[in-house]
Amino acid sequence: MKYTFITTVICIVLITYFAPVVGQTVESKQDSSSTELQQLKEQLEKLKAEHELKLQELEKLINDITAKMEKAEQEDELQKLLEEAKQLESVERTEETGIGKRFHTGVRVQQKLNPNISVGGDFFGAFSTSKGDFVSEPSDLSYGNNGFKMREMELQLNAPLDPFTRGKTFISITKEEIAIEEAYMEWLNLPMNMNLKAGIFYAEFGALNRWHDHALPQFDRPKALVNLFSNAGLSGFGFSSNFMLPQLLFADANMLDIAIINGGNGFSFTDTGKDRLIYVGHFKNYYDLSRDAYIEWAVSGAAGKNDPAEKYNSYVGSFNITYKWVPVGRSKYRTVDWRTEFLFGVRETPVDSLAVSTKNINSIGFYTTLQNKLNAKYWLSGRIGYSELPYNNKQSEWDFTTCLDYWQSEFVFIRFQYQYNIRNFDNDVILGYPGVYPNDNSFLIHFCWAMGPHKHEAY
């Protein structure tokens, strides 16, 4: 007990003595930390102020340099203008000194009047399982098969005649003849949004009539068009007026074309006679589906005489629809083009040799063609068509075609084509090939090239 009491007393004395010292130590440490924190804040504020000052100095320096550069550029530009003025002054003085002593030929001015000149070559080699002349030999219905042939050399001349008119000429050169394919003049931007055309031209009819042979989606024209208008299409000498109409039927654009031509090919319309006038109308509507695609539809009609005496009429009507997809920024690599056309013909013919009464022969036809651009070089296309002859609707023809086109460049392409024809022709003396015409398979390689800027209005 004695020792316990002494130990307790000693502890109380030690605590009483050292407690104030410990408290003072803790307080002194807290004060020291607060002082250091305050010093750090002051240093940060000082650094921030110095940084802002340097930024202001740097901005001022940049502004001064920019102003000096702009001033130097202005001075340089002014100096250039002064030098050009001095040069012009010296040229004027030289010209004044040489008045009456110089002769200018004007050759450079004459060169600007030269038209754009282009030459195109259209060659092919073909093989058919049919050896008949109806298939093998060139005619109004066929370009020929079983051999290597030149379909056409085309010379094109194109130029503006003045600010109001332009002229175009296409000369077709074949083995048999040199002929004018198209030659016309156009007056542009007349009142009522009208253009006028006069000369020899393909009429606006259907989807493909305006197209030249080398630009067709496949090597040949659809049989539905060939059996109505021959390989030459619906063309002739005449006049045409084209109107851009106000927006109708919710379309983005409407166009009306009216033409009178002196033509005919011996199929739907006579190629002999005194007048041989054909009246053609074409109404087209255009719709934008998106920024990558559009669709358009058109109604066409043609009327004329079908006999040399020009007593009997023929009428041909057409409805066609076109869809085109061209992705923005990728038109070089991807395009889809689909066209379909339905045709209906009415032909007046005498019932007997006395021609006291007449009857109508109605014929129908259609085709659909699809082109798919696979990449920058290759196109794959196909076509299906059916046609009844306009003078004998009991005779008909189917054609199935597929093509692979290789575009070496925009001036050269090679086409490989396969076609299968199913014919129901029998004793067709009008065509000059009496007898039965068999079905046939044909294989064709087509070479087409162009020299110069071969320009033609948009098809």
Image: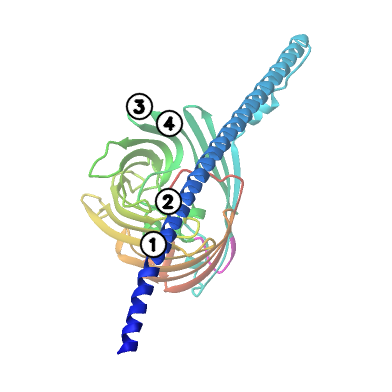
Measured from the top left, where is residue 341 in percent x and y? 33, 57
Q: Which residue is mark 3?
A: 191
Q: Which residue is mark 2?
A: 233
Along the viewing direction, whichever of 61 and 236 lies nearer the viewer? 61
Measured from the top left, where is residue 176 in percent x and y? 58, 53
Region in magenta: 143-149
Comparing marks 3 and 2, which lies closer to the viewer?
A: 3
Within 10 Å of disc 3 (Cα), the crowding (few <14, some 14-19, many 20+) is: few
The Cα–Cα distance between marks 1 and 3, rounded to whole angstroms, is 37 Å
Within 10 Å of disc 1 (Cα), the crowding (few <14, some 14-19, many 20+) is: many
The Cα–Cα distance between marks 2 and 4, rounded to whole angstroms, is 25 Å
Q: Residue at x 40, y 66 (%)?
A: 22
Within 10 Å of disc 2 (Cα), the crowding (few <14, some 14-19, many 20+) is: many
Q: Earlier in the sequence, mark 3 or mark 2?
A: 3
Q: Which residue is mark 4?
A: 188
Comparing marks 2 and 1, which lies closer to the viewer?
A: 1
The Cα–Cα distance between marks 3 and 2, rounded to whole angstroms, is 31 Å
